[in-house]
Amino acid sequence: MLNRFSIKQQLSTTLTSIVLFSSFAYGQGEWTRPDRLPEIPTTAPRTWILANQQAAFSEYCTTGEGTDFYTRIKEGFDEKYLSFPFPDEPKSFGDSDPKARTSAKIDAWRKAQDTCNEVAGIASTATIIWRVNGEQTYLDKAREFLVKLCDWDPEGTTGIEYNDETNFRLLRLAPEVYDQIRDELTAEEKAKVLAMFQRRGTTSFDHILRKRTGLLKRNSLEVEPSSHPVRFMPMLGMMGLALWDDLPEAKDWFAFAYGFYENQFSPWGGDDGGWAEGIAYWRGVIEHASFQDALLLIDAPEAYAQPFWKNTFYFPVYFLTPWRSTAFGDTPVAGAIGIEPGIRDIITHAARVHQDGYLRAYADLYEDPHALPEDELEFRLWRKYPTPVEYLLRDFLVADRPLPAANPLSDLPQSIYLKSIGWAAIHTDLGNPQNDIFLQIKSSPYGSFSHSHADQNAFILNAFGEGLAINSGYREFHRSPHHNGHTRQTLSKNAVLIGGEGQTAQDATAIGQITRFVSNERATWVQGDATQAYQANPKLKDVELAQRDVIMLQSGLVIIRDEIRSLRPESVQWLIHSNQQPDKTDDGELAISQNDANLLVDLVAVDNELVIEVSDVFAVPVDPKYLRKGYDPQFHLIAATETPTCNTVIYAVLQPSQGKDPAKARIQSASSQQVEIIQTNGQTLKIDFSKESPEISQT
């Protein structure tokens, strides 16, 4: 039954109880209460460490597998945070609308997050140390920070409406702290803390509902999801579990989150495990998994049981290089991402949960120079989450599940198509990144919405541990002039412009579609249709077709055919971006080299000429303040048709290779539907695109 309600509550506290009246007027939202809930433990605590686990956890941290990690956490905490004073409440930085943020406001916004992460991190770390050694000093520290947090205005500068990230940093840990130490609080302290949680919890739930989160559908933009409220769902659910019999609202919070994960998650993808916002925002799965871990802790059979949770950990296996490379969608500030410590940890955790040796093998590819959570020498609680104690608790949760032996990733299919998000990946040697040629193509039904970009039919090419055809641009901060004016735009992608125009950014209607995906032992063919993405641009209403065919042979040779049809003559600009400046070879090809990896590119426009320009200038420059952080220059090659026409066909042949003598492949002849290519070995490759599926022959 659909529950429609408005939340109107007022808090009145005595020394021993919480009494609810009506006063705080909040908005209205809709959600469907699940028919059933898992069995909830009858006694607290219900999160992190259950009552019957206390002795086992202490043993795990003092003489068991977690000893070294716990010791490092305690030593770091004692040195940096045991005497750390409770900080002042973060100050206002003016209009907090994300669209109004400047570089200076971003600094203040991030500083406030750091402060809140420290508050919650200190309280939670002190709590866990106390749980292990029982020393009053740590209990006092946890209690001090939890109680003093109550003096901050829940609807002020750390409230969800002003700075949702600060509220999130506090509520993702503080309720669990209370769950562990509630019996050690005085009646006055308990009443004060619960009053704070009621206000923050109610405003958070209302915010999530007003963003229509209760109406979201799995793998759908029918109701457009708001990225942050979706990310806040595990916070809400675990807060409900931690406060289960302390606040009457808590049961609603848990029920809402539970139903969301059972029936609606994920709006950003489907059962195949994809995440439309991109691999960087897939990292949010680490947070969402915390709710699955909470279910696992209380022995709920639903934990990690849905198809999404069985498949999503393969998303990085296919789409994330171990080393830092560019990726589709928003990425960290420096524009690249690899297997980071947190990603490696969650993949290892999933390998234990699912007893999956392929995930173990992928986690073993980790090569990030940053230390893993359990090996981190510098103990910090300032910005990142999960915090060290969360990693420790996660390890304890699956300590009884052995890490499976690694299975060779070469045994898996070398290509994959995720229909739910319109992404495809093709590998020549999955699991051997120094020898692998990895091509990814995107044409997504999610368009350029949220953290996605205007990149339908775009590709990225990595080979031999290097990025050869990259996504261009950085994200110094979200919605920076450079991020909006360059990184999000089609002009920063390995894609095409039509008449100098690209697809519209931040537009759920600017969609693409992978219309064909065929893979066999010889080659993989992907066909993408980005017509609607270009038509969403008011200047490109006359576009009738924007189709890209991509064929990658098992050898790594890539053939791309772009066909653009328009009611009026248009020039077409074919784009490729790189970290190193492209050079022209004596044979007229374009050469891109990155350390020991090479890429030769040959381009032909049928019945037209191409004018090639190379630039290292961004459409909008990077914020100068960030240049000192090591942002490297990037190069942008534009191959433009000389004569505007109503029907343009461009062929591109991309030959990756390794070593001093680059392999070559040149276009010998090309017509609208056929292309002939001379390869390094002298053989001629013929591809006929006029058939239902391209016919490939070699002589």
Image (cartoon, helix red, strand yellow):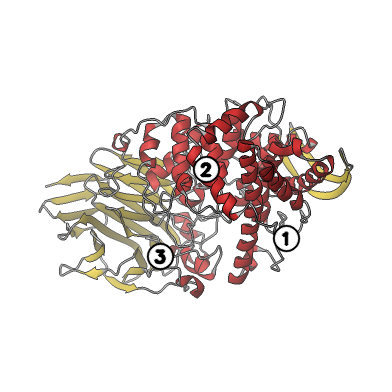
Q: How many marks?
A: 3
Q: Which residue is mark 3?
A: 497
Q: Eyeballing the image, is 313 above or below 146? A: above
Most foreground residue, 455 or 8: 8
Give the CA separation, mark 3 to mark 1: 49 Å
Q: Quadrant of residue 426?
A: top left
Q: Is residue 120 visible?
A: yes
Q: Nearer the viewer, residue 550 or 643?
A: 550
Q: Is residue 39 toward the left or the right of residue 354 in the image?
A: right
What residue do we see at 75% from left, 35% from top? 183
Q: Position of residue 585 (x, y in %)?
A: 18, 68
Vertical placement of 362 versus 676: above or below? above
Q: Position of residue 434 (x, y in %)?
A: 27, 50
| Neighbour tally class for label 1: few under 14, some 14-19, many 20 plus, Cα within 10 Å | some
Q: Earlier in the sequence, mark 2 or mark 3?
A: 2
Work out how far the residue at label 2 is from the one at label 3, CA to CA, in angstroms: 56 Å
Instruction: Between label 2 and label 3, give the one nearer the viewer.
Output: 2
Please state which amino acid type lies under the numbered disc 1.
Glu
Number of the label disc, if any, that sits on residue 71: 2
Q: Amino acid at mark 3?
A: Leu
Residue 121, disc = none
Residue 502 image position (x, y, % from top left): 45, 64
Query: Taking 664 as reference, is 349 left or right?
Result: right
User: Residue shown at 29%/61% (left/top)?
Assistant: 650
Q: Is residue 229 left or right of residue 342?
A: right
